[in-house]
Amino acid sequence: MQLSKTCEGIQSSVTLAIDAKAKAMRAEGKDVVSFGAGEPDFATPAYIVDAAIAALRDGQTKYTAAAGMPQLRQAICAFTKKNIGVEYTFDQVVVSNGAKQALFNALQAVCNPGDEVLLFAPYWVSYPELIKMAGAKPVFVPTVEEEGFAIDFTALENAVTEHTKAIILNSPSNPSGAVLSEKEVRMIAALAIKKDFIIISDEIYDALVYDGAKHFSPASIPEARDRVILINGMSKAYAMTGWRMGYSISNPTIAKMIGSYQSHATGNPNTVAQYSTLAAITSENPEFSAMLEEFRRRRNYMVETVNAIEGLHAQMPAGAFYVMVCIKDTIGREYNGKKISGSMDFAEYLLDAQMTAVVPGLPFGADGYIRLSYATSMETIQKGLKRIRDFVKGLK
């Protein structure tokens, strides 16, 4: 029997697989340190949890509109205007089961077989698979590693073809933590207008920026706004990863297509989580500033410690909660007689030798790197980095 060729070509998420493996090892009683998880280690703020409990007690457990409750979509418009200064109407918003579904919906709405979607490398591991699921082809655009994975605009221009349908921006970036400047975003928007392609702007980490860095959305550019699909959600800034709440905002035509698609694919997102999200974005989050400062402190310690390990180095990221660690100087060295040929080997041998889980750079399009998350306690970071240092020191 011939099964789906599309599904056969989709790779499972390496980040989720590594996190699951680390948790399974812990369940076996092993002292595993994991730098894999892309989720805050903080609890969801109490006022959001209280809103969920209140919704349950009030019997708010029925279906809502497939695109989300109108009052929530209106609140997202107000929230977006407050954050980036852009005014939308509620019919341009589709609330989904996480930002990942919002991305999936957006690509399904705009892509046809043979279309190409541009990605800056390194990229989030799910982007290429989501593009392929929409029948399109991912096209990878290199960045300048030595400058913190800055955009190479010439490489971007050269990557655009008559088949280019869209570009996915992710600023701040998972995995690099790079933040696009306003100038860079405006240059990309100008190219999109000139060459007539769509900008899918994944802004899930928009609030997690440090040292004066500022997030700038392409939706803030009036002449580009109609070709921008803005993606955001609650997972990162509100520590709501498991609640699965995300949304897209786009021009009315695309929004209607996305809403129709979702109405048949999943129907409405979780009703109780919608009420919690409404509470989250219509009130001030009293815990966010402390969380951001703690992330900054961990980031500084991680980068400084990594750069003190001979054979490794890392740039200081401007946003998100990841550090890309260059391991190129370890390639060709050996662990227990086995040669390290790339990031997959490094991650496998490190877990075997030191029970420390990291995410290899290969699935991100950066094989000479590993990704470390500092969305974990300082104690865990200190223990894990000591193990990484001992592992690298012991290589032959």
Image: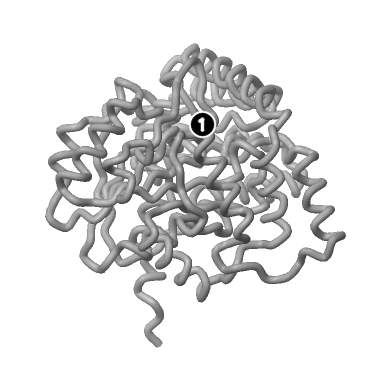
> Given the current orientation, which residue lies at the most extreme right position?
57
Please name whichever residue, 161 or 267, is drawn nearer the observer in this view of the structure.
267
148 and 337: which one is in front? 148
Comparing 226 with 166, the one in front is: 226
User: Between residues 255 and 265, which one lies in front from this camera angle?
Assistant: 255
Categorize mark 1 by other alpha carbons within 10 Å: few (<14), some (14-19), many (20+): many
- Residue 366 visible in the snapshot: no
Q: Quadrant of residue 289?
A: top right
**Residue 61 shows up from this direction:** yes
Q: At 53% from the left edge and 34% from the top edge, which residue is drawn?
A: 82
> Where is 108 relative to 286, above or below?
below
Q: Is residue 65 left or right of residue 210?
A: right
The residue that label 1 is drawn on is: 320
Q: Secondary structure at mark 1?
A: loop
**Which x, y percent locates residue 175?**
44, 36
Residue at image point 42% right, 47% down:
230
Decide if residue 124 is on the left or right side of residue 33.
Answer: left
Above or below, 62 against 279 in this view is: below
Q: What residue is drawn where x is 55% and y is 21%? A: 299
The percent coordinates of residue 318 (x first, y second) are 45, 23
* Quarter occupied by the C terminus: top left
Quadrant, the N terminus? bottom left
In the picture shown, does residue 107 fall above or below 2? above
Tell me the kind of residue under disc 1.
Answer: Ala
Residue 24 is situated, as x and y percent measured from the top left of the image, at 68, 50
